[in-house]
Amino acid sequence: MSDYRDKSNDNNADWHDSELSALYQKTSKEEPSQQLDQQILDDASKEAEKPLQKQVENNIKPFAPFSKHWGIPMSMAAILVLSVSVILTIDRETPEMISKEPAPLLVDELKIVTKDETPEQKLSTPGITPIETTTEDAAAAPDRPQRQLVKKDRGNVQNGAVAESDESLGLSTGFTSDLANDSARETQSSLRPAESDSQFKPQATRKKSEIEPIQRERRKDTQTGARLKKALPKTKQAKSNKQEVTDASNVSKTQHDKVSIDPVTKKTPAKAKPGAPKPAMQAAPSSMGIVADVASAPPLAEAEAVQELTHAPQAADSVSSPQESASESSPSGTFSRAPSANFSQSSKQKRLEKQRNTTGKQCLSLSQADCLASDTCILELDKADKTYVCRAASNHCELNFIQALADKKSCETKPNCTFTAAQCYCPPGVLCVCGGGPPASCSLQSN
Amino acid sequence: MAYPASANRQNAVLKPGAKSLWAYSTPNICGIVTALEDKAYDCVQEPPSNEQLMLQYRDGNTQAFTELYHRNKSSLYRYFLRQTQRNSIAEELSQDVWANIVRSRQRYQQTAKFTTFLYQIAHNRLVDYFRQSANRPGEHPAEQDCDQQAKTSDHPDKQAESLQASQRLLELLQELPEEQREAFILKEEAGLSVNEIAAVTNVNTETAKSRLRYAVAKLKQGLRGFL
């Protein structure tokens, strides 16, 4: 029907001329030859006689994956597979990449890292060295040693100190705790005989009057150890630090060991201000030469738990600092009696100066963050150069004052010390509104 | 022209004077009615279309192909002859096209007219031929075939006025551009509509119309004295 319409339209159109068509039809009489006709018809009949199946087989195209027919599905499948694999790869890689970066340390963790290192670790981490603190300095921070005690005791001065500090180091350096535990086990095994020596040998030589209070204290410690178990997990600090929670069970044992190590050290706590929290076990010396940490500020609950273990400071003025006693401990790991009142003032000063010199050099090598977290180094703004310089603490106010914490209380509890808050100081790597000002400081009041 | 009969043919009764019998083709109402009522009717069946013949040939009916061939061979041959102006080449190209149809019969689908299908193949073959001949310096399509020249010059005495006009028409046809000539031949020889010409030559309808219009105008102008 449509053909008919087309034809009729065509016939009426200007491209059609009936006369011309008629003339052409008269002209067109040529025919192909009979021979050609016969040849074509023969070919057609031969082709038609061929079995249909064979022809169908011949017409079936072989599977050609790169032909146009398969092109689109194949490319779609390839795109799908590629995109899925890329997504999976990204999903897998992203957590690893994140975990490769060291986790940002909390200020507390930084503190732990800097405090709890063994001498061996300190050697491996430049800029962090053992520091001895004077009795005076220790007394200036009466509420800090308690935390140090807990940390020390948990690992124990002899037994677990290495392991614990290894773990804490692991936070910053990426060492696994397994490695640390291995080294701790080795250390434990090597130190146990010495520990027993240290416990019994001195006692044998002591007088009865000295031994009796020690025994009393031991009994007390065993009782309070259990209480400490309960008390510790409640602390805020324990919440923030999983290590403390998990190691809480060790605390009682280590406390006991610690207390029994050296009775002399119990006398070391600072000048006890009446009513002030006792710097319990701050003087706990380690056979490894670990410096007592007096800078940490424990939370109240922890402090209470620790206070039960503390021993009343006796004749604090006449006793030398625990660091001194630690430094004078015999190389074999046994503790000798601390040279309490025998130290002359001049030798003390010399030693302090020497220590400051060595610390000063090490402070210079610290980064800003480390310096802020250090209790022996002070980050100061050089007003002339407008650069930050890390120097050793020069007075009792600066000593044990951790700038990162900016603890006003701990500063102002020290005599003649004034706390100055940071003025537009911006730590490196932190986006701040302003920067370039001095960090928090605890300075000595100048009369 | 008589064609071989098939099983259906016996049900149809040829009317005397009927031009041809197409009863061998597809079943038809006429055949069914006669079979049921056992009654003879005068029944002149419609001739099967080209498409039906091609489908029958696809199913193995060689007679259908013979019929199909005889219907279309002359127009196809002349299509090539008008374009190439050589008998030998026109026959060769025609043979190629029919061979192609025979080979591809299994893939034949009745989606368009058979003539469209046929002349599409012919057009492609002609394009190939022109490409090949353009690369061969010895063979130029414009060269007149000696046989063709001889044929036209064989009957100078028989040429009447109309024949002179026909001759003039053929000459004018050769003077037309290739595309316009092809469009005109497809219309006159194959009887294709403008749309079908456009489909065969792969151009849009307007282009086909334009080509036809120009061709007709030029031919009419050339034949002014004869028409």
Image (spheres, coloured by chain):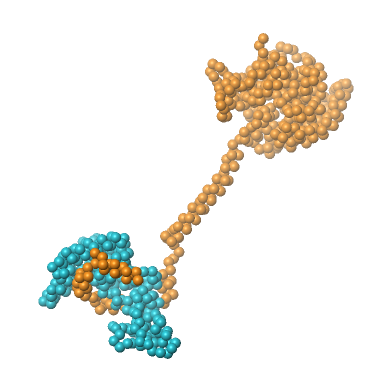
Chain colours: A orange, B cyan
The x, y position of residue A139, in whole percent, is: 74, 19
Quarter that holds the C terminus of chain A: top right
Residue B1 is situated, as x and y percent measured from the top left of the image, at: 28, 83
Choose between B171 and A236: the one closer to the eye. Answer: B171
Question: Is A288 placed left or right of A217 in the picture?
Answer: left
Image quadrant assignment for residue A172: top right
Q: Nearer the viewer, residue A435 or A334?
A: A435
Which x, y percent locates residue B220? 18, 66
The answer to which quarter of the image holds residue B194 is: bottom left
Q: x%, y% of residue A403?
A: 64, 23
State the quadrant of the N terminus of chain A.
Answer: bottom left
Q: Quadrant of residue A379?
A: top right
* Extreme-top residue of the structure: A447
Judged left or right of residue B201, residue A19 is left
Residue B153 showing in the rendered view: no
**Closer to the camera in the image, A113 or B144:** B144
> Up-down: is A81 above or below A324?
below
What residue is shown at x 78% (from left), y 28% (from top)? A304
Q: Is residue B72 left or right of residue A318?
A: left
> What residue do we see at 71% from left, 20% from top?
A133
Examine the rendered structure and indicate whether residue A105 appears above or below residue A402. Answer: below
Q: Residue at x 81, y 24 (%)?
A: A311
Residue A69 appears in the rendering: yes
In the rendered image, the vertical position of residue A15 relative to residue A173, given as above or below: below
- Which residue is rendered at x = 55% and y = 45% of the image? A90
Foreground pick, B207 / A136: B207
